[in-house]
Image (cartoon, rainbow, N blue to C red):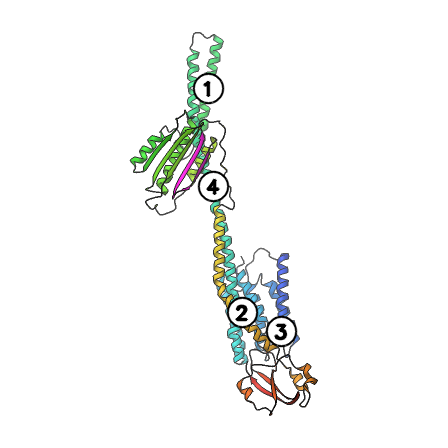
């Protein structure tokens, strides 16, 4: 984001002069210069240098320069509006539109609000100073204290809103991605810890089996029925098994290095004992077993224990006071463990409570054994279900697909919520002005159209002579007459039996203008008058 210094100059940043940027600048310059050319075309006393050449050059420098010097661009275009205040015929030049465009870009591109306000206040000070020095009348003062402040402030506020909207979306997206990366890191740590526990379980079960093999080999080595060669082979077998046990112990020791080294590596506590301890702590826990209990693999048995333990821990942490029901069912060579807790009867303690770390580890453990694990809300509570084969190495169970970050990720949901909030604020901030504009602008535009199409140029008025037939000079008359003359203008005496039509002498919408009155009788002009200073 471009930043503005106290001098109104944007701080240096990466280059922005891309092809798209140049195309935008060219289109913007064309629109703003076209508005100035239209004003020049309709002006009563146009000056090519003042109304075209100088403004076009200023815009040609200000539009691309607003990317690096947005404050200076606003100040330069405001100079064109101040130049309009010196025009005796029309203070409301078309470059107020250019001023609004530059102030919008100032608000959209510049983060520093105080320095931008200094630029806007300086521009307004210059405009008022021009009115004071030149001793301008009420119409120019009205233009300087209403139209120019609106062109300076309102577009800048809109630009600031757009900048805040972009910042909200980008910052929210960056924060969401950071949080998601942190969550993935935490989940990965949980998986690694669970793999360490799995390695410890493998050591406990496999090490126990290998130790029994070594013990049997040692006993066999002492048998008197073996020959010398057989005894040497059995001794070599015993040494090999002993070395394998030592290597397994060393490997697991390395894996268990750290603060988690003493965590449940070789727990022999049963599920019943675990629930007894929970009940002694005041937890309403119930255990239901279904089916004949098979001889489970040690790794599967410990996984069952870990599912119940982690689910019970989460229930007491996140749903204090809830009742916990544990169901363990055995059928068709697989074991299903379900832990369900009811809605909490107490409010969890305030503060950030970490979650899903243990579940990530459980999912890793159960998946490594060929099983699947599901966890989610259930009847105002929470349920964890794990299905595993009774023996390690059996056919894996299908149905579990890891969730990849995408549209359903937390960051994506937060992003969609932020966008909805920004759209809602945009609607609230702009629906009222938009409704007012839809109501007022058509009426104002129609009035301006009527005033612009009832102008009789002074030269054409001078060419019309009393006594001429209307058809002789009809080409010089505007399409319609002026419908809103003042009561004083209507009260001016007119020839008897005549019908009079009023015309405005110039297109100034803010100042008092002279009215031309043409009076006709039987299609012949019988009188022409100039009524000075009739206001709109």
- Mark with earlier residue (2, 3): 3
Q: Is residue 88 left or right of residue 225?
A: right
At x 50%, y 74%, the residue is 145
- Magenta segment, principal secondary structure? strand
Q: Secondary structure at mark 1?
A: helix
Q: Is residue 377 magenta?
A: yes
- Mark with earlier residue (2, 1): 2
- Mark with earlier residue (2, 4): 2
Q: Position of residue 130 (x, y in %)?
A: 54, 76
**Which residue has dot 2 on it?**
151
- Residues 358 and 134: in front is 358
- Mark with earlier residue (1, 3): 3
Indicate the quadrant where residue 442 lies.
Answer: bottom right
Q: Residue furthest bottom?
A: 496
Vertical position of residue 228 compared to residue 511: above or below: above
**Which residue has dot 4 on it?**
185
Vertical position of residue 285 compared to residue 509: above or below: above
Vertical position of residue 357 compared to residue 171: above or below: above
Q: Position of residue 456 (x, y in %)?
A: 63, 82
Q: Is residue 176 magenta?
A: no
Q: CA distance from mark 2 to mark 3?
A: 18 Å
Q: Position of residue 164 (x, y in %)?
A: 50, 58
Give the extent of the magenta segment.
371-393
Mark number displayed over residue 39: 3
Residue 299 shows up from this direction: yes
**Which residue has dot 1 on it?**
241
At x 56%, y 68%, the residue is 99
Q: Is residue 311 left or right of residue 83?
A: left
């Amino acid at each position: 984001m471009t930043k503005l210094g106290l001098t109104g100059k944007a701080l240096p940043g990466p280059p922005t002069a891309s092809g798209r940027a140049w195309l935008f600048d060219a289109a913007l310059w064309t629109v703003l210069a076209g508005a100035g050319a239209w004003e020049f075309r309709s002006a009563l006393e146009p000056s090519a240098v003042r109304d075209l050449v100088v403004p076009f050059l200023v815009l040609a420098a200000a539009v691309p320069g607003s990317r690096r010097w947005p404050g200076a661009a606003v100040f330069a275009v405001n100079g064109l509006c101040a130049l309009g205040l010196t025009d005796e015929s029309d203070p409301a030049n078309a470059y107020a539109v250019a001023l609004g465009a530059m102030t919008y870009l100032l608000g959209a591109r510049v983060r520093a609000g105080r320095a931008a306000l200094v630029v806007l206040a300086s521009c307004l000070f210059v405009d008022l100073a021009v009115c004071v020095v030149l001793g301008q009348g009420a119409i120019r003062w009205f233009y300087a204290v209403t139209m120019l402040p609106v062109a300076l402030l309102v577009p800048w506020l809109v630009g600031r809103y757009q900048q805040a909207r972009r910042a909200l979306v980008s910052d929210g997206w960056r924060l969401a991605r950071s949080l998601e990366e942190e969550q993935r890191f935490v989940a990965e740590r949980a998986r690694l810890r669970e793999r360490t526990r799995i390695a410890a379980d493998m050591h406990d079960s496999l090490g126990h089996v290998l130790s029994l093999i070594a013990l049997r080999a040692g006993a066999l080595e002492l048998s008197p029925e073996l020959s010398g060669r057989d005894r040497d082979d059995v001794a070599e077998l015993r040494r090999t098994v002993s070395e394998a046990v030592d290597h397994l112990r060393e490997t697991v020791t390395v894996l268990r290095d750290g603060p988690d080294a003493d965590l449940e590596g070789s727990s022999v506590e049963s599920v019943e004992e675990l629930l007894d301890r929970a009940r002694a702590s005041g937890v309403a826990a119930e255990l239901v077993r279904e089916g004949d209990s098979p001889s489970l693999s040690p790794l599967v048995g410990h996984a069952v224990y870990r599912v119940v333990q982690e689910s019970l821990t989460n229930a007491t942490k996140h749903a204090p006071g809830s009742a916990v029901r544990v169901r363990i069912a055995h059928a068709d060579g697989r074991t299903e463990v379900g832990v369900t807790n009811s809605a909490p009867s107490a409010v969890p303690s305030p503060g950030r409570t970490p979650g899903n770390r243990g579940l990530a580890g459980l999912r890793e453990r159960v998946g490594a054994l060929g099983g699947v694990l599901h966890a989610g809300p259930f009847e105002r509570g929470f349920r964890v279900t794990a299905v595993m084969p009774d023996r390690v190495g059996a056919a894996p169970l299908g149905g579990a697909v890891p969730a990849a970050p995408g549209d359903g990720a937390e960051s994506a949901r937060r992003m969609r919520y932020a966008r909805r909030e920004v759209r809602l604020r945009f609607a609230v901030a702009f629906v009222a002005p938009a409704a007012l504009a839809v109501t007022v602008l058509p009426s104002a535009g129609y009035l301006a159209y009527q005033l612009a199409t009832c102008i009789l140029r002074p030269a054409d008025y001078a060419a019309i002579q009393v006594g001429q037939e209307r058809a002789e000079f009809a080409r010089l008359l505007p399409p319609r007459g002026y419908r809103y003359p003042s009561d004083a203008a209507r009260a001016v005496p007119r020839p008897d039996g005549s019908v009079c039509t009023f015309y405005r002498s110039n297109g100034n919408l803010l100042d008092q203008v002279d009215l031309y009155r043409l009076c006709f009788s039987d299609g012949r002009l019988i009188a022409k008058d100039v009524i000075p200073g009739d206001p709109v």
